[in-house]
Amino acid sequence: CALPISATTMASASRMLRSLRLRSSSLSKAAAAATVAGLGAFSVNAVASCEPGLDSVVTRLEKVANRLEAIAEGGDYDTSVDAALLAKYSNSSDGYIASCISKICAAKVTNPSNITASLFSIKYFDSLSEAAQKALAMCINSGAQNADSGMGCYAMSPTDYDTYGPFFSRVIAAYHKVPRGSKHVTDWNLSGVEGLPEDGQLDLTKLGLPALSMRVRVGRNLSDFKLPGAMSAADRLRMEQKMCVAFEKLKQKFGGRYHSLTPGHPDHITNDEYNALVKGHKMFKDMSDDSYLADAGIASDWPVGRGCYVSGDGGFIIWVGEEDHLRIMCMNKGTVLNEVFDRLKTALDTVESIEGLKFAHSDTYGYVTSCPTNLGTGMRASVHMKCPNLTADGTDAACKAVCKPLGLSVRGLGGEHTPIGADGTVDISPSARFCISEAQIVTALYTGIKNLVAEEATAKK
Ligand code: ADP
Ligand code: ARG
């Protein structure tokens, strides 16, 4: 039967084949052969059954490929620790491998909530080439050296998520609580999103709240550089230079300036200026103090290649060289969340339209970020909100307990891993980033705040 083959169909078919090739390269030979054989048999049947369009055949092929891959891997992916393999790698002449593998295996017992430790398979690791072993060890070293990690790994290259699919797909599914192989779809359109008020306005005054500090950020990485954990100092400098060209364009439209931490840079700022920017929530903290980032290599060469662009009105900011190449955000004290959300979308479109800036993106995982926790949207939408009753004991413990089932994360006043404000101010944001749309995240923030306001009132009694 002759079916019309559209360009889109051809593109998705070739994308699928590309992704299959990548994924099968990280499976053992036997598993790859089983997957490909199964897929071949399915393709013949699918085409013979003459579906109404090739698009649906491609979609079905993808689903079947995922299923076959899972079956083929089933016997291969064993997270138990084989004593002989542990001895082999713990005694490796490569000290990095020895330390990383012995510690990640130990953490399986001491820290079962470390997702990387619990899903690391020494047998899968053993099936890889020496170069691939080194690359995967770099991805998991943070979780090995910091056994208390929740996630415990960072990608070093945008392709790592596919190349080491048997490991990463499990970690991603476990953290984001989605089936393995789930695909992320980007969507900023608010209309029709569940929980959105009829007028489409996410207005905090309707929840009885005053103006709050609101912020929406996305993590983005440039497709022509390695991810931050694998960058050299020279890479970091080249990337900063590339962004400075882009900032010249942004300055024409939004005013403002770039602030660099690179010694000798024309836009270099003093320590006092840097501290003031951190205090004003515009710049990121000293990364070398963060052992998760340091052991991932992400904090290396600090402060080289690091800085931030701040627009003339201070409300549009781009960080350069933190956990992701770029963190792009809009921030404002106000009452309507749409303001920062819409402004970020417009600003992002401008950034993306700058020639030469291409963000790393995956057909499966959406926007690619260093940390699997941020995959998909890379978005964190937050408010600084006072919860004096839920923090009456001076800690965030009760607030976290209430927020977790509401799908909200609680952070301190200075961001992740910082204490809450003396007046009980906490940073509240929806936890989900992957397999959720951008529009759903900002709406989830609104709904979450509404629920938290009720919990805070109850806690008073
Ligand atoms: P990220 O949000 O990029 O994951 P952090 O949690 O470390 O990183 O926060 C980075 C900075 O952004 C910190 O100074 C934090 O206080 C600030 N911040 C986050 N949310 C808000 C907000 N709603 N208003 C003002 N500052 C905020
Ligand atoms: N690597 C740390 C852990 O596994 C932090 C993970 C989430 N935070 C982040 N900034 N990516 O616990």
Image (cartoon, rainbow, N blue to C red):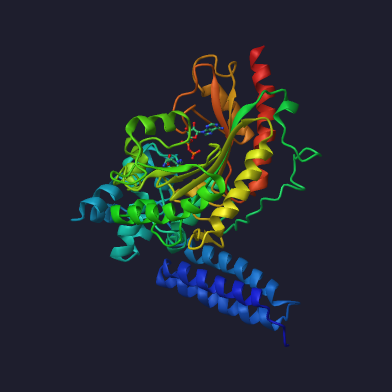
- Please tell me how many numbered marks the rendered image carries: 0
Specify whether 15 is left or right of 324: right
For image coordinates 43% across by 51% down, the residue present is 325
Farthest top residue in view: 461
Specify whether 93 is left or right of 17: left
* Residue 133, position as x, y percentages in the image: 32, 60
For image coordinates 73% across by 81% down, the residue present is 50
For image coordinates 66% across by 44% down, the residue present is 342
Position of residue 428 relative to residue 139, above or below, is above
* Residue 89, position as x, y percentages in the image: 25, 54
* Residue 160, position as x, y percentages in the image: 42, 59
Picture quarter with the C terminus: top right
Picture quarter with the N terminus: bottom right
* Residue 154, position as x, y percentages in the image: 41, 50
For image coordinates 41% across by 72% down, the residue present is 29
* Frontmost residue, 152 versus 261: 261
Farthest bottom residue in view: 1
Position of residue 460 relative to residue 166, above or below, is above
Q: Can residue 106 be seen by looking at this rendering? A: no
Res. 380 image quadrant: top right
Farthest left residue in view: 93
* Frontmost residue, 278 versus 454: 278
* Frontmost residue, 49 versus 386: 386
Specify whether 328 is left or right of 110: right
Q: Can residue 341 be seen by looking at this rendering? A: yes
* Frontmost residue, 103 versus 215: 215
